[in-house]
Image (tube, rainbow, N blue to C red):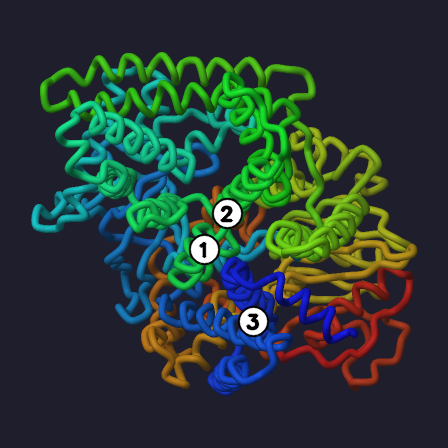
Amino acid sequence: MMSDALRHLIGLQRGHLLPWVPVCLGTGIGLFFALRWEPGPATFALVLGVALSAFVGARRLPETVGPAALGLALVAAGFTLAGLRAHLVAAPVLEYRYYGPIEGRVVAVDRSISDKPRVTLDRVILLRVAPDRTPARVRVSLHGAQIFADPLPGQTVAVTGHLTPPPGPVEPHGFDFQRMAWFDRIGAVGYTRTPLVLLAPPARAEPLAALNRFRLRLSAAVQAALPGQVGAFAAAVTTGDRAGLSRETLDAMRDTNLAHLLAISGLHVGLLTGFIFTALRAGIALVPRLALRVPAKKWAAALALLASAVYLALSGGNVSTQRAFIMAAVMLVAVMLDRRALTLRSVALAAIIVLAWQPESLMSPGFQMSFAATAALVWVFGQMRQLPHRPPRWSAGLVALVVSSAVAGLATAPFAAAHFNQGSNYGLLANLVSVPVMGAVVIPAAVLAACLAPFGLAQLGLWAMGLGIGWILNVAQVVAGFEHAVRYIVQPGPMVMPLLTFGALVVMLWQGRWRWAGLLPLMVAGALWGVSARPVLLVADNGALAGVMTQQGRALSRARGHGFIAQSWLENDGRDRDRETAFARSAPFAAPQGGPGLRFPVAAAEVAVLFSATPDEMRDACARTSVVVSNRDPEEPAGEACVLLGPSALSASGGIAVVLRNGRPQVTTVRGVHGVRLWNAPGVRAAARAHDWPGLRRAAPRRADAASAVAPKRAEGTGRRDTADPDNGIAGDVSAASGPGQTAPLAASAAERINPIAEPPPHEWLWAFEPRRRADRSGRPNGQSRMTGPRDITTDVERALAGEAPVRTAAAPNGR
């Protein structure tokens, strides 16, 4: 009886299993990125063995078990694809702070989070850095006036600036920029306050450089014809150049859920191909002789596919546009093959291609939101076709508009909220009055301008395009000005989005009444999101910034500096994001009697937060509190028992978060959550290089070579040691060895610069001050510091915050 029911249940899925292929591939890819350790050759051999065994077994097992075996094989295949891709894109990563000349070829120009111009360089040359240790690409924010050159793709430029390794997550479960940079082959990020110097113009023989020059000339021509933000919007949707958009425009579009109109993605490619397909098919039908001799629909689909390929090239070919082109190409090819274009199979095929080509795209918000919207639209309209009663034909267009806007908004809202921590209360209204204008005015006018450009009449199309864009910008400004237009949303827990995605997929893809069982994980995900608790204490990975949660919101220890970290914390809290207000909340926590720093109450203890403190101030804070957070390591540790979280401990553990579980503190670290992977640990890269993995032969230099290359840089000058790009969340303030307003030598020691955020170093995880009255079991004089092993950092902090003494101590290294 049970077997018959199972056979019937499986039988219902026949002909509907293809959409589950990208789901299984994505599961394997997600498992690879969720690991806290880097799998080696033996692991991949085991996974490949499982994949082959499951694939062979799927053909021999009964039909009730065969699909599950095939799914297991696809999960293993996804895991392997992600691992292969991670090694194939391997490139050297800068493993220390660098200050000096930077030379390279411009491959991309955009703007940073602080609205500064930013360039990405390849063919990089760094002073006294061996070629096999030089990053393949670096990204530099331009904070000074560019009086010598306007950066253009293809130019070879030089500048003097600061570079650091790509930063890690600002808190456990936070956005992992290191991982994204690894797959973009960006090995260093930084900034400069000096102007770029043009060394060589773009090479004429390079097709890509020529295409980029044409794109920028087209962007300049569009912005000259349509001045102001209207022209910047037009340039963004035609060439992908968003450099002209102001921060105010971007914020207004984001606050009204209209930002998707700026990024060339599925909407733009779909509107473009749809308009060209419809126009060409109608045009062919108007010529009877031609219509009787050629398949109009197939010709229109082929020409629309060609137009979308041209659009892909003109837009710069970024990842979201490539993904949209693949989706459009799959559907247009289906038309040419006399297949239904808008089906879940077409969406699944596009997802398979994207995941096989770029497995890392699964973790990006663009992939998640675009496929969520497309799959939801196809499924909902498929369900509507089965309704016994349909709306009148005169209202079909309006109904389709309202339903598509509502479905796309609901499908993408959870992913947008999870990644960007905000939602728009009037986003549906703004989209209802803007998306039709985009499809009926802006895109057709852009096509008209392109057709009239050879005759010198492009201005006619651009004029109509400007009218539509002006309407959209006005809608964004007006709706963003509504009271409570934006709601801030707390960061969900790590299991929320997987559960939500799984539930939605079961509802859409499973056949039969059991599909509604997918509502259960959806409800569980919603409940978990609703009770998501933010950490009561957050500490940055260099000890220079801390934040404690109060009833009014998070109180930050500093008013300036580390802007990306502070902004990320406030956004993840889902509350007010004003930095000055957050700093003002720390006023009641000032140390009593004019003492240094702040004193935050956490659980059963106090946490002292110091900045550029003297040894006496450190000893005083340690004598009065259980945990001390400082941007400096102690020179002569002594004092009452406390746990010190300084740069040495935090550089190995990453940022720290403290949450309260049943009133007891629970500590998590970035390293504990995100693990030791290729993109965040030089030691792992060196081990992979020892196994002769593809692409890693140049990615991991020997430690001795690195030390010898770093040492000469001591004489290169002075500068702040925390020399990171403030737009990317790395410190950019006073060094650990200097007071406010002072500078320190760029390189204090070669060993310190080799591995500042790498895998756990063999020394110095956590310094613990022991009381003078307590016997020292290690034999060292009373009052000297002790350290704990890497596994004890969470335990020591938890015990200290609970009012207990740290456990498991060992002697500190000599000279500390």
Percent across and percent down for residue 547 are: 72, 45
Where does the N terminus fall, quadrant-wise? bottom right
Residue 744 visible to an observer of this rendering: no
Give the mark nearest the N terminus, 1 or 3: 3
Q: Are marks 1 and 2 in contact (CB under 8 Å)?
A: yes
Q: Nearer the viewer, residue 634 or 390?
A: 390
- Residue at 67 percent across and 43 percent down: it is 572
Q: Nearer the viewer, residue 517 or 648?
A: 517
Residue 5 visible to an observer of this rendering: yes
The amino acid type, in three-letter code, at marker 2 is Phe
Q: Nearer the viewer, residue 527 or 654?
A: 527
Mark nearer the viewer, 3 or 2:
3
Location of mark 2 (residue): 371
Q: In which quadrant of the rendered view does residue 798 lie?
A: bottom right
Q: Nearer the viewer, residue 792 or 84?
A: 84
The amino acid type, in three-letter code, at marker 3 is Gly
Q: Is residue 517 left or right of residue 25?
A: right
- Residue at 60 percent across and 44 percent down: it is 415
Location of mark 3 (residue): 71
Location of mark 1 (residue): 351
Local SS, label 2: helix
The amino acid type, in three-letter code, at marker 1 is Ala
